[in-house]
Image: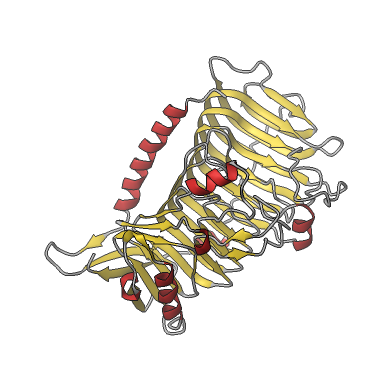
Amino acid sequence: MEFSIKSHVTEALISAVFLLGLLSSSVAEYGEVGQATSSISFPALNCRKHSAVLTEFGGVGDGKTSNTQAFKAAIANLSQLAADGGAQLIVPPGKWLTGSFNLTSHFTLFVHKDAIISGAQDESEWPLLPVLPSYGRGRDAPGGRFSSLIFGTNLTDVVITGNNGTIDGQGAYWWKKFKEDKLKETRPYLIEIMYSKQVQISNLTLVNSPSWNVHPVYSSDIIIQHLTILAPVDSPNTDGIDPDSCTNTRIEDSFVVSGDDCIAVKSGWDQYGIKFNMPTKQLVIRRFTCISPDSATIALGSEMSGGIQDVRAEDITAINTQSGVRIKTAVGRGAYVKDIYVRRMTMSTMKYVFWMTGSYNSHPDPGFDPKALPIIKGINYREIVADNVTYSARLEGIENYPFSDICISNVNIKLTTKPKELQWNCTDIQGVTNQVTPEPCNLLPEKKINCPFPEDRLPIEDVELKSCSVSGNF
């Protein structure tokens, strides 16, 4: 692959530093020099009546002392205030080593800009959970899975935020075990929220996750914004944001450097996802930047067996990334990927601009149904500019079951100095194009059309955050 690891890491760091400055400046701090306390304002779904600091529950921010019990004690105590205006837990400056801990409803976890929540290296600090029912097995191993560093299930109104505080998964320990095939259970994620509604994850820097970074699953009414997510580009499966069987989700104003897909939209795996039957739908992604030399800016699948529908992506930037929006599926997945809308993408140094794969043949077990064929239709791309591109498109449907109703319009692709001779590799697809260069394949004939993008708004787009605050001697 024609990427310089050193150059794209340098670009990633420069971009990250720039974005960190933007994020920090978006959160106001008040208080004059010499005052004992300061106040920090931040946007949130809801403000809380009660507030506490981790040190009140025995927390020690020296980077060596385990704070797992301090987090658990603090959240157990504050959970009793859910019916009385809710509570927020402030993680103050320091390095707070911890294992997995669970959140509660009507609750805010606020990570100060000079605080680092750091994942413990002791596996006993990470409880085991059953496999996800829509997957049927762990992603790394057939057994169970380690609980995420920050975890919550069956919650209402939960906020994980800060003024650009850091959550460090210390993933190298887990990456090494994965590469050496020593895992008996699936690696933990950094943040996972299950079976929940009214979720906000924002204004944080996430680094070195053991595996996926942010995983909302079986949840609804989710806002994810102003995140900086950083992982080595050769780290295994460090997806940025993975909405999974979720409804009404908004992802915006974030920057990801990843060893895998920057965003991966999912909904279950083969027969288990078909049986669970919970799609991801009503998803908006906007003002998002990705660097991932070996993966996609936005992937739809490959675990999409509950269905993916009504995804709207706009104002997306990809740099030194393998592909733009990639559809990944296979025989046995069933379900559908449909009503996908993408506009205003800017890409630089790409292997592929367009990529669809109907033969992504990873399966949880041999029990998948070979007659379960996925429906891929209503895929719309428009207003895309790309330079330094190796392949314009690789579009591979399923034999005798083509991907259909593909629309691509107003696309200008400039090629690398050594492009592939076959720029549009198309099989088992059907659709149209308009004003696209280089000239597309004959399966996508020219038609005077501007590919659609919905004019209505999703409900999550109209959710406005409130101005809240935390105070303390920071």
The quadrant of the rendering that contains the C terminus is bottom left
Q: Left or right: 119 with respect to 126?
A: left
Q: Residue at x 60, y 64 (%)?
A: 128
The quadrant in which the N terminus is found is top right
Q: Nearer the viewer, residue 89 or 419?
A: 89
Colour treatment of the image: secondary structure
Task: Relative to 458, say whether 384 is above or below.
Answer: above
Q: Is residue 331 left or right of residue 9?
A: right
Residue 413 position in % (x across, y down) = 57, 25
In the rendered image, the vertical position of residue 140 relative to residue 56, given as above or below? above
**From the viewer's perspective, is 96 left or right of 244?**
left
Q: Viewer-proximal residue, 450 or 240?
A: 240
Can you tell which quarter of the image residue 244 is in?
Answer: bottom right
Residue 238 in view: no
Looking at the image, residue 443 lies above or below residue 119: above
Expressed as whole percent of the image width and height from the top left, the position of residue 121 reads 46, 55
Query: Residue 8: x percent and y percent?
Result: 44, 31
Residue 201 in view here: yes
Q: Nearer the viewer, residue 361 or 466?
A: 361
Measuring 28% from the left and 64% from the top, which residue is drawn there? 40
